[in-house]
Image (cartoon, rainbow, N blue to C red):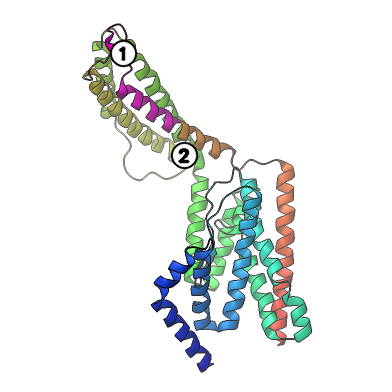
Amino acid sequence: MNKTRSALLALGAFLLTNLKWLVGLLKFSKFGTTLLSMIVSLWAYAMVYGWKFAAAIVYLIFVHEMGHVIAAKRKGIKTSPAVFIPFAGAFIAMKDQPRDAGTEAYLAYGGPLAGMLAFLPALPLYWWTHDPFWALVIYLGALLNLFNLLPVSPLDGGRIVSVLSTKLWFFGLLGLGAMLLASPGPMMVFIFVIGLITWWSRAREGYRQRVLRYEKEKLEGVLQEIARWPLLDSSIETRERLYAEKEEAFAAQAPKGFLIPFLQDDKRFVRDRIAMDKEYAERTWELFRKWEHEPVLFVDGDPSRPAPSALLTEADQAARQRLAQVEELLHRLTTYYEAPASTKWKVLIAYLALAGVLSAFFVYGQHLLHVR
C-alpha cells in the first residue's frame, strides 16, 4: 500500500510540475478538458481511497455524463465537454436551452440510464470471480444514480419530474434535508442550497410574469411615444407633458421595508411598478431633450426630405430588442412546463421503473458487500 501511495504521489508531483506542458498537449484534443479533469480526479480519489476505487468511480461518473451528452445530441442540443471535479462528480453545460421541460427531462434521464448500464457488466464478473471489487462497483453505480434521481433540482431527478410538477421539488427537498441531518457533508449542503434556490425561483415565477407584463406595457408605450415625435409641428406640449409625467412618477410614494412574499405581493408590485415608472419616465424625458437639440439632417440636402433621427432609430431598436426579450421570457415562463398527459405518463413510468431497478441493485450490492 505504501509503495502504491508513493508511486501515486510521484505521479501527482510529475503532473503538477508538467501541468503547463500537459495542458498544451491536451488543448488540441476536443476532449482535452475532460481528459485532464479525469486525470486530476483519478489522482485525487486514489490518494484517499486507492486506485481501484478511483478507477471505478471515475468510470461510473464518465459513463453517466456521456449519457447526458448522447441524449443532448439526439435532441440537437450542443453541450460543453464533461468536466470532472474531485469529490463532487462531474458536469456538462448546455450551450442551448431545451425548448420545454419534456426535452429537459429526456436529457436528464440519459445520465442515470447510462449510469445503470455502466455497472451491469460487474454482475457477471462478480458471479464469475466473487471478487468484492465488482460488488463495490454494483453498489456504487446504483447509489450514485439512485441519488441523482432524487426529485430535487439541479439533480437529474428534479429535472425529470419537472415535467410532472415542480411542486415535487419541495418533497424532494424534505427528503434531502432528512438525509443531510443524518449524514451532513459539504456537497449535500451545496445541492440542498441550490435546490432550495431553484424551488423558490419557480414558486415566484407568477410574480415575475406580473412584473414582466407591466414592463412590456411600458416598452410598447415608449415605442408609440417616440414614433410620434418626428410628426410633431411643435414640441412644446409634448415637452410639458413628459416633464409632468416625470415629476408625477418621482413624487409617487412606494411601500418601504420588508414585504412578505406571496402575502404582500400587491404592495411589492406597487413598489416595483413605481420604480419602473421612474426609470422609463426619466429615460423618455432625457431622450426627448437630446432629440430636441439634435441637428436636423436632410437627404441629399433637400429641405423637404428630412433624414430619420439616428438618436430615435437607436432608441427604437433598443426598445424593440428588450421587448423581444421580455416576450420570450413571458412565453418561456408560461409554456415551458406545459406537457400533454401522454408525455407525463411516459415520464412517470420511466422514472419509477428506473428508480425501482436501481433500488433493487442498490440493495443487492449492499447485500453482496455485507456477505463478503
Q: Quadrant of the C terminus?
A: bottom right
Q: Residue at x 27, y 28 (%)?
A: 282
Left or right of 39, for residue 141: right
What SS does tag 1 mark?
Answer: helix
Left or right of 79, for residue 21: left
* 344 up-or-down from 245: above or below: below
Q: Identify residue for label 1.
A: 299
How far across and how far down the image is residue 188, in percent?
Answer: 51, 67
Query: How many numbered marks, from 0 up?
Result: 2
Magenta stretch, residue numbers: 299-323
Q: CA distance from mark 1 to mark 2?
A: 45 Å
Q: In the current view of this chain or complex, which residue is farthest to the bottom? A: 2
Residue 149 seen anywhere in this rendered image of the structure: no
Left or right of 164, for residue 230: left
Residue type beneath disc 2: Arg
Q: Quadrant of the N terminus?
A: bottom right
The numbered dot on residue 208 is 2
Q: Main secondary structure of the magenta part?
A: helix
* 25 up-or-down from 270: above or below: below
Return the residue nearer the eye: 300 or 32: 300
Find residue 133 and report its image quarter. bottom right
Q: Residue at x 33, y 17 (%)?
A: 308
How far across and how far down the image is residue 270, in percent?
Answer: 38, 33
How far across and how far down the image is residue 295, in percent?
Answer: 22, 18
Task: Say which of marks 1 and 2 sits in front.
Answer: 1
**Looking at the image, is mark 1 or mark 2 earlier in the sequence?**
2
Residue type beneath disc 1: Val
Find residue 332 and report its image quarter. top right
Q: Residue at x 39, y 38 (%)?
A: 268
Find residue 271 and report its image quarter. top left
